[in-house]
Image (cartoon, helix red, strand yellow):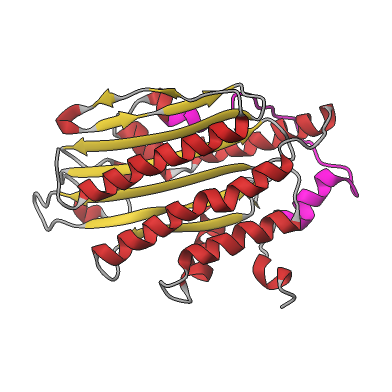
Amino acid sequence: MSDPIADPVREYLLDLQDQICAALEQEDEVARFEALTLERERGGLARPRVLSDGPVLERAAVNFSHTVGAKMPQAATTRRPELAGQGFQAVSLSLIVHPLNPYAPTTHSNLRFFITDGSGGESCWWFGGGFDLTPYYGFEEDAAHWHRTAKKACEGFGEKLYPEYKAACDAYFFLPHRNEPRGIGGLFFDDLDEGGFDRCFAFVRSVGDHFLPAYRPILEKRKHTAYGERERAFQLYRRGRYVEFNLVYDRGTRFGLQARGRVESILASLPPQVSWRYDWQPEPGTPEARLYEDFLRPRDWLSEADGG
């Protein structure tokens, strides 16, 4: 289904998908993405791409979706009840990278665009998305690089944008039942329409274009670090938090399931191996304990890195 507003977003996200998949294949050097192209109802499109069991990337999913629906799913109208019953288009690129090496962090990014058809009310549109990082063994220089690049993505769009979207990311990627964050955050925004379509779309492109510069240097630096069974066991344990968040709290997962999307694509974000331990706590003074003490808490990474 063609739309003069949604079409340029769709083309940008399709191109970004190609760029990210090519870069991740270069980092892994062996594994390749399994690519599908699936036509959907009312002119929609799904283009899932999943890489598995590589020597560097145990799982990576970079999935494009264009959904055209007759009725907004509940997950999209919880905060906008006035849109219930409207037809819609949703265009998104959602990705997850689970490296094999425990010293290389997991990362996630999502960029999405909604537009309603105005049936029974006024038509409206908005953007959402961001990117975040989930280390298992923390490095201050990696966190500073990640957040410095996130700030660069916001430059030119207002000085308040980075601190606002960093705070929103910290708040969103939080597990209340564990009372802990999922990782060290990044950027998160939703319901973005302020300033008009062109300005919002330019910002979304900036976020998308800064993802690889934010993540790839960290992956390159950590992917060949020596590790043993202890580090692997801790990685699998911490991945359990990732699963808990995605299945209990994540809006994108709920939206995809409620919109009757392809389940294999929606759940491709989950790690292929994970473990839970009963009432486990890291021993004081260990690198595992340091993750909790130094990284899984609110920090102004840029101010600290710059000595502020």
| Vertical placement of residue 225 versus 272, above or below | below
- In the rendered image, which quarter is residue 258 located in? top left
Q: Is residue 13 visible?
A: yes
Quarter of the figure with residue 229: top right
On the image, the x and y values in percent for residue 182 come to 62, 47
Quadrant location of the N terminus in the rendered image = top left
Q: Residue furthest left?
A: 120
Residue extent of the magenta highlight: 266-295
Q: Which residue occupies 54% across, 31% down?
A: 25
Residue 116 image position (x, y, % from top left): 18, 50
* Residue 300 visible in this rendered orientation of the protein: no
Q: Is residue 272 magenta?
A: yes
Where 292 falls versus 225 (above or below)?
Answer: below
Location of the C terminus (image quadrant): bottom right
In the image shown, does 3 or 263 lie closer to the viewer?
Answer: 3
Q: Position of residue 127 (x, y in %)?
A: 32, 55
Q: Say which residue appears at 15% left-offset and 43% top-offset.
A: 87
